Amino acid sequence: MQIPAGEFSFTRLEKVIFGAGSIAKVGHELDRRGLVRAVVVTGKSLGASRLLDQVTDALDARCVGVFKGISQHVPMQSVRALTEELRRLEADAVVSFGGGSPIDASKVAIASILNGRDMTLAGGELDWARAMAPRGNQAALLHVAIPTTLSAAEYTPAGGTTDEATRVKRGVLDARLQPALIINDPNLTLATPDWLWVATGMRALDHAVEAIYSSRHQLFTDALAAKAIRLLFANLPGSIRSTGDEQLAHRGYCQMAAWFSLYGAINVRLGISHALGHKIGPTWNVPHGVTSCITLPHGMRFMAGIAPERFEPIAEALGIAFDAGNPKLAALACADRVAAFIAGFEVPNSLRKAGVNREEVARIVKPVQEEVNFAGVVDRPVTVDEIAALLAAAYD
């Protein structure tokens, strides 16, 4: 028996407020910090919806502007425009409203202001130690995240942008980019299209599974991730197939699953399914939640051959018998169960269904291999042939 040992660093997340109607508390949270110039950041769809009024009404006179120019995969030009708008309005708080795109855009724009340079150009500086740097005296813009999907981008101090010309997505890590306040109000998710809600739910499932079988996994993150898996399997179907208070309850539990799935993931990092998604998404304009629907079962089958013993919490969460003497059998059964779960929803679950040209797939093999090996979450170096085989399996 090994003696448990390791480290766990907490981000600068201060508070999560959850529950139907919790958006009403955002004004008080700004007041107690003495903040009076908040800018709401969102995309075109939410920017044209009545839900935006609930956010701006809750902010009242504290809201000095609304930026509606954020789109999928966070194009660099939109982040630059947001940065200038935050400067022009002399914002002291940023309220991101929507999915991972406005949340990430807000992080990178804040990074540009804090560092006094265009951080979309510095993308790729993935300094993991900096993500958990000690608190300094330098003040950061308060970031309040109000998510309407299950992407869980709000739980990390990392943000990514996409170069419109090359379709390459790069990330920035900085402890100061962690949103300090998150408001999970299920009322504000009801206009989210079912396909997007489900796909980002699969993204949360992807977070949870990959946190558990990461070579850096810890008991703390294992426990949270396993609970996330249980909650998603129990509540994601009902979150789109029920109505009224029942639907709000299911959505509230899904929001908690997203929270549990990614909280602490900066410590353990994520694996091969995410690396595939990071390249598939911007290259072919596939939403990141959809990439998880495509890649997660294949990533699980790959890891079943690498570290099947680490699947025990996943198997327990899924109600699959786990034999420590033959762990690969249960690990593969977990992958099959997840594949069947994804197939039960109307979301693309192959590269072909996502509209990717088979002849183009080879272009991302090397970048995916480099990301996986850089992250160091697989027990040995992964080869280009293995990545190519994974993509071939994911095509059909």
Image (cartoon, rainbow, N blue to C red):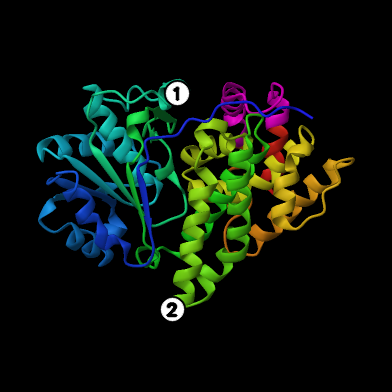
Marks 2 and 1 sit apart, C-alpha to C-alpha, by 43 Å
- Density class for disc 2 (Cα within 10 Å; few <14, some 14-19, many ≥20) is few
Placement of 340 over or under 174, stated as above or below? below
Please name the residue shown 34% across and 41% down the image.
179
Residue 94 falls in which quadrant of the image?
A: top left
Residue 4 x, y percent position in the rendering: 67, 29
How far across and down, in percent of the image, does residue 156 sit? 43, 38
Amino acid tagged 2: Gly
Q: Residue at x 73, y 36 (%)?
A: 303
Q: Which residue is mark 2?
A: 244
**Viewed as shown, does residue 179 lie left or right of 41?**
right
Q: Which residues are magenta?
A: 361-387
Which residue is more in the foreground, 37 or 344?
37
Q: Quick one: 23 or 1, which is closer to the camera?
A: 1
Residue type at mark 1 is Leu
Picture disc at residue 126:
1
